[in-house]
Amino acid sequence: MRCVKDLTAWLESEYTVSHLMVNHEFCPPEIEGDITINCFRFAKSLKRNPMEVAARVTEFLSSHGDVRLATCTKAFVNVTLETAALFGDTVADREALLDTVLLPEAERCRILIEYPAPNSNKPLHLGHVRNIALGSSIVAILARVGHESIPVNLVNDRGIHISKSMIAYERWGEGTDPQKSGTKGDHLVGDFYVKYNAALQDQLAALRKDDPSLEAESDDALFERTEIGAAAQEMLKKWEAGDSAVRELWEKMNRWALDGFDQTFARTGVAFEKIYLESETYKLGKKIVDRGLEEGLFERRDDGAVVVDLESVKLGTKVLLRPDGTSVYMTQDLGTTDLKHKDFEPHRQIWIVGDEQIHHFKVLFAILGTLGYGWADKLHHMAYGMVDLPTGKMKGREGTVVDADDLFDEMEALARLACEAACTERGDALPEDIDHRARVIGQGALKFWLLKFKPRSRILFDPAQSINLKGDTGPYVQYACARISSILAKEEVSEGRDGPSAQVDWSVLDRPEERNLALRCADYGRTVRRAAADLDPSVLADYLLSLAKEFSRFYRACPVLNADSPSLRTARLALCASVLELLRDGLSTLTIDYLESM
């Protein structure tokens, strides 16, 4: 707001200070005014009593040409703007409004974001879908405010979990492959992982039956005492030793899984700057462990395992190499993190990984600090909560996980049914692009639902509710875009970034619904910047819902095409065009598409 900028300059001159932060908030409905200025927040910088400062601020703003009324309540100054100033400072210049999201050049940096880091022993599932929604939106939000955001993926394609699928294929695969079985590659590999775990459970049960004293032992403790567990561990040792037969089987099954992932990623529009493979980075991690051992930072236990003592930072002791010399997850994470830094030299690295791995990342960052990496304090784990369904928690090892591909199919089917029902209700024929609409609405509903909650929240995903046009959903925001597009199409109004709308007489817009809508638009830039600073897409999702609802209130109260005068119609159309621009930009920043007709 121009009056706030002028106020800031006046206060700095009057009190001989610099870099004063004077921010405004929007008045709540019960308070008269458009914006409020909280003088408590900057009075200390002026070394003055907040009440005294508020009185001076009220006096200054009361004489400002853009201000209709300024009143003081304790240290809060409530301001009602002149109509032309209100709209001129908000929606009149769409390009300037959209550019309010950008950070100053000095605050922009290069940020590397790793997600979704799947294991190549099973297909992507609902948990991965939330990861992908969060990851892709964080990448887009950071880029939108001006950072250079670099998306990368790490595929966990080696380790004991991979050996399990391979053992199962050796025993029960009978030479099948995706083409012969008619099964998508990652799904086929996952089927064998499920078979392995079923056999493992049978053998664990037999062990405990033969020796009741083992009842209290965990599955992990008894793993290598089962025949099938020992076989998987032996296969892992052969893999790390480069056994040709094991490597040949691994390469074949790995390719099936990676091809399947690519198909799933394509459906979400996800692309990565680089894909790292654990099978290529774990050796780098081993070299780092060897260096730490040589420098006395790590130690070798009596059983041959290499460990790091992190008791000084209350993180216990962590194994970095098993007694048989094979790697653990931490080993490859050390190698991958170092490689990513060398590849891209980012100012920050972010991992988007579930909150069950919080301890893992604390340990990783602590080890990197112990090793002397100067950038170890620029690493951040963005943790997120699990996703449940109305039918209960997903359980991957039992094969009851909700696969991402099946979920996408279901969402598109629900969206198609909704489109068909809407056409029937209107008496319209089905549009030729019904399949496209179903994909956009289905994906939008899914992504928006997964993003509208705080990342750390454990959420319940209800597919049917997420598609509801009348709820707090993605389709509700998409429908607002379609409605405005329809209005503008009838008047052939430009929807682009066409700069200052000099031909519009904004002074004719003075209804509360019009003013509130313009004020809501004015908060777009600050909202996107907060979403970027907090790494929280829900901030933007909530804003888009509120903007769409504010537009709905405006549309019900203020006729647009049937306005009372040509100047009023022109102004309201221009206001609609600005709202549409923000809704589209916001959805795009959440990596959600919009439709011009629904």
Image: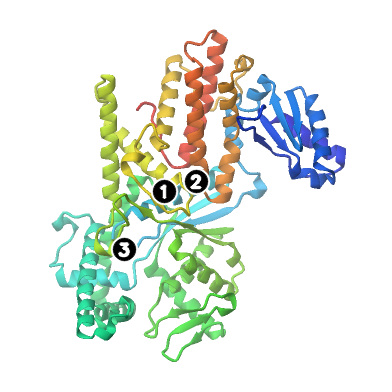
Residue type for callout 3: Ser
Sequence-wise first label, 1 or 2: 1
Sequence-wise first label, 2 or 3: 3
Task: Identify which residue, 5 or 347, lies in the foreground.
Answer: 5
Dot 1 surroundings within 10 Å: few (below 14), some, or many (20 or more)?
A: many
Kindly identify which residue carries mark 2. Answer: 537
Q: Are marks 1 and 2 in contact (CB under 8 Å)?
A: yes
Picture quadrant where residue 96 is located: top right
Kindly identify which residue carries mark 1. Answer: 133
- The secondary element bearing badge 1 is classed as helix
**In the shown orientation, is residue 170 left or right of residue 385?**
left
Image point (48%, 87%), residue name? 300
Colour basis:
rainbow
- The secondary element bearing badge 3 is classed as loop
Image point (24%, 66%), residue name? 193
- The secondary element bearing badge 2 is classed as helix
Give the x, y percent position of residue 325: 39, 83
Measure how far apart labels 2 and 3 are at the Cα level: 28 Å
Q: Which mark is residue 324?
A: none
Residue 532: tell me if it is visible: yes
In the displayed structure, would residue 169 be above or below residue 82? Answer: below
Residue type for callout 2: Pro
Between disc 1 and disc 3, the foreground one is: 1
Dot 3 surroundings within 10 Å: few (below 14), some, or many (20 or more)?
A: many
In the displayed structure, would residue 167 be above or below residue 398? Answer: below
Q: Are marks 1 and 3 in contact (CB under 8 Å)?
A: no
Picture quadrant where residue 164 is located: bottom left
Q: Which mark is residue 120?
A: 3
Give the x, y percent position of residue 540: 51, 41
Give the x, y percent position of residue 148: 55, 50
In the displayed structure, would residue 183 be above or below residue 19? Answer: below
